[in-house]
Image: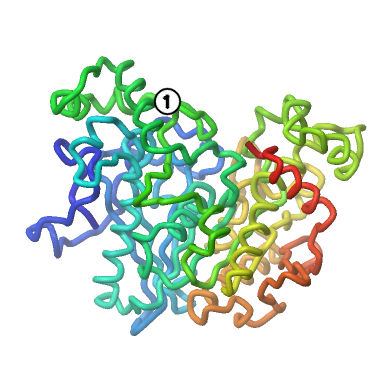
Amino acid sequence: MAAPPVRELRWKPPQPLPRAATGLKVTAFGPPCMQPVSPVKHIYWQDLGPQSEDCLSLNIWTPKDARGAPVLVWIHGGSLVGGSSREALYDGARLAERGVIVVSINYRVGVFGYLAHPELSAESPDGISGNYGLLDQIAALKWVKDNIASFGGDPANVTVFGESAGGILVNDLMASPQARGLFAKAISQSGFGRTAGPPIRGEAPRTAEKTGAAWAATQGVSGSGPEAAKALRALSLQQLSIPVGGITDPNQPQPMIDGQVLPQSPADAFAAGREAPVPYIVGGNSFEASLFRDALANPALILARAGPLRDAVVTAYGGPSDLTAVAADFVTDLTVIEPDRALARLHVKNGHKAWVYYMSYLPAAERGAVRGVEHAGELEYVFGTLADHPVTRGGRAIPAATDQDRKISEAMNAYWAAFATRSDPGSAGGPAWPAYDLATDRVLEFGPDGILARPQFHKPTLDLVEKVAEAGGGR
């Protein structure tokens, strides 16, 4: 989809493929982008395999005899420092069976994707650096717009969807003027909708440049001028693949507010009515706190984020007898579930349609053994890639999918395809999924009791969390 971002193209916006590189016969997935060991490796099912800087590729699944088919473009997760579109979890075949073309993309991550540095900014015509991973996604969407008709797709009916870091990036694309017109719909799964909550992100260009310069100095690159940029590009892949930090480490290069690619945070863009005016699905899982397992060892620290509302939070989430459970449910709502509601409310206030979901369904064998649906736990249901035989994931033995599991998966898969096709997930048939409205706060819950649209969804606790977030408790 773009020229290899290597040598002189390292830390530059993606460039078009040379004409000689087009029309290649492709028989296998491209390599994952360079990355350190993923801090969320427990989410994934497979070893990513050999990595490469030459990684800006995409994958396409098409229905039989596709003509004018809707298009779903998948942005993988991985904490903005890892992941790949080649994951077996993201196989688009089941969605394609519903008449939808699925495109999954690679994008630069970590230092390769988001390093800002004064000398990289100085050589840029726009005077900025960083956000290369986000620019990779915009380039992929442009490629889809220009080429998907050749695969039987409709370039005017593209839905962008992603989970975790991918959900964050979908929200970034909603806020980016450079992505405007490149997609007609969006789905953000576990997308951390408020900038106040983890991950810590959104620093301004000059601050990010100072952080990048400090990191470069640890690799022996200092000074200024073109020689500094040249020295950066001479760093080895081994040096560049050393983990800088996790997603909540402010030293980890991440998407930033640069005034151009991303003029403001998604939350601020939605609040100002500047988000993309497209139909929008947003949602999360019942145990998003699984992403913060180390932090749950110190529930007092998590609950301190509630500030003067701490005691009210403890009471609302079940009382002081089990503070770890309280902290888990509180941080799930603070980082994902309440921000989902906040963005949906803003989108509707701005005159656009939104739908909200909540995934709490667990296989019968797991009920009582785990607190809820972990971060990324919905993916196998959305893609229809449930295990046909027992597997081990996250250190736990997962039994083969049951008929009940597959019923939930069939429904989620159908809702996503219907949204891509007709801009209304409720058109899939089955349980009704009404559009979100401010009066009823209806959320579609995929739960152990089935699929139900629930009004005033978790209103007492989410209203309390909203107060915490607006007071800065999510920072």
Tell me the element at label 1: loop
Work out whether 72 lies above or below 217.
Answer: below
Residue 349: x %, y % from top left? 63, 69
The x, y position of residue 306, in whole percent, is: 76, 36
- Residue 305 appears left or right of 173: right
Q: Residue at x 38, y 60 (%)?
A: 177
Q: Residue at x 77, y 54 (%)?
A: 364
Residue ID at (67%, 69%): 407
Query: Can see residue 451?
Result: no
Q: Is residue 178 visible?
A: yes
- Residue at the disc numbered 1: 244
Instruction: Find residue 254 and report its horizontal and vertical position in percent.
Output: 43, 38
Amino acid at pointer 1: Val
What is the quadrant of the N terminus in the image?
A: bottom left
Along the line of sight, the residue nearer the viewer: 13 or 359? 13
Where does the image place residue 80, in percent across and percent down from the top left? Answer: 44, 41
